[in-house]
Image: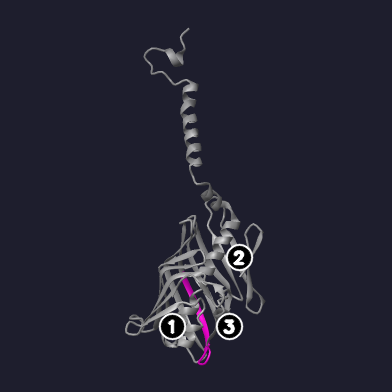
Amino acid sequence: MPNFLFDHPGLSPLKKPDQLAKPLWIFSIFLTLAFSCIDPEVRRLQTNQSVEGEELYRISKALDEHLFYAFQSIWSYNDSSRVANLPGCPSVAVEGEEQEVRLTFSSGTCHGNPIVRRGSILLKYQRSPINNRDMVLITYEEYQTGDATLKGQRALSLVASTRESRTWEDRASELEIIYPSGSRSKHDLSFTHTVAQTFITGLTGFSTEGQSVGRNQTGRKIEMQITQTKQFQGDCLRQNLNRPLSGTEVWTIERTTTSAVQHRLNFQRQDACQTHTLIQLDEGVEMQKAP
């Protein structure tokens, strides 16, 4: 008896079950091969919260550690005694007519400690054409701090000034942090820094509030909010100890298949200028980094 489905004359033959299964097997093999081609390190980064916490610590540190230089007035860079005591021992070139200061860091030691910075920071002192405010434009020229390289610019605008303090708005768009692997994160910044100062000693400390938004090294959207004001002490900064003595950052990282996760960086003082950062991951794990 003829098989109606497969042998009836005048009808287009239907595919047999084994014929139908073949394309599915081929598609399945294709997906397996495609997934296996994804860099295992990338897959690990996308799911490992401890790696995320390490990156957030690195970002926070890279954004903070050089602000001390930008808070100095241009005339202070003409004071040889102040220049000699700058943390990191940069060479300083002042262009008076251009109102520019270039700080260049090279390998070696500084006051007995290894220099952890490389490259240059260019500080341009000017007045805003929009609101006539004093500004400091920071440009990174192959500037590396630790194992992170910064690329881009950020602008400090003076919004308030007294004999005891100066308040700066800090803005940046798509500031990049590049890691040794070649991966990078991008950040839009919106901070406010209040700098305490005296005429004799200069900067005695500063505090930072604000937030940022951007993408981490795996391309995930990240947002940061300073929920407890970060506090920095001038004496510690001059010793090249540039982590906050107190404060909290809350970082939110977007997920594609689950709700966003939140990691918390708590900055804590141990003794004098000795500090550590307690990283509290969304999954409940805590890590401690020093400084």
* Residue appearing at x 47%, y 40% in the figure: 34
Residue 172 appears in the figure? yes
Q: Secondary structure at mark 3?
A: helix
Numbered tag placed on residue 188 in the rendering: none
Amino acid type at mark 2: Arg
Q: Which residues are magenta?
A: 189-201
Q: Nearer the viewer, residue 39 or 77?
A: 77
Numbered tag placed on residue 235 in the rendering: 3
Numbered tag placed on residue 264 in the rendering: 2
Q: Position of residue 35 (x, y in %)?
A: 50, 41
Callout 2: few (<14), some (14-19), or many (20+) C-alpha neighbours within 10 Å? many
| Sequence order check, earlier mark of 3 and 2 | 3
Amino acid type at mark 1: Leu
Q: Position of residue 96 (x, y in %)?
A: 35, 85
Q: Position of residue 236 (x, y in %)?
A: 58, 79
* Residue appearing at x 60%, y 65% in the figure: 264
Residue 40 located within the stretch drawn in magenta: no
Q: Is residue 97 left or right of residue 44?
A: left
Q: Position of residue 82 (x, y in %)?
A: 48, 86
For label 1, the residue is 158
Q: Quadrant of residue 262?
A: bottom right
Q: Nearer the viewer, residue 137 or 273?
A: 273
Q: Secondary structure at mark 2?
A: strand
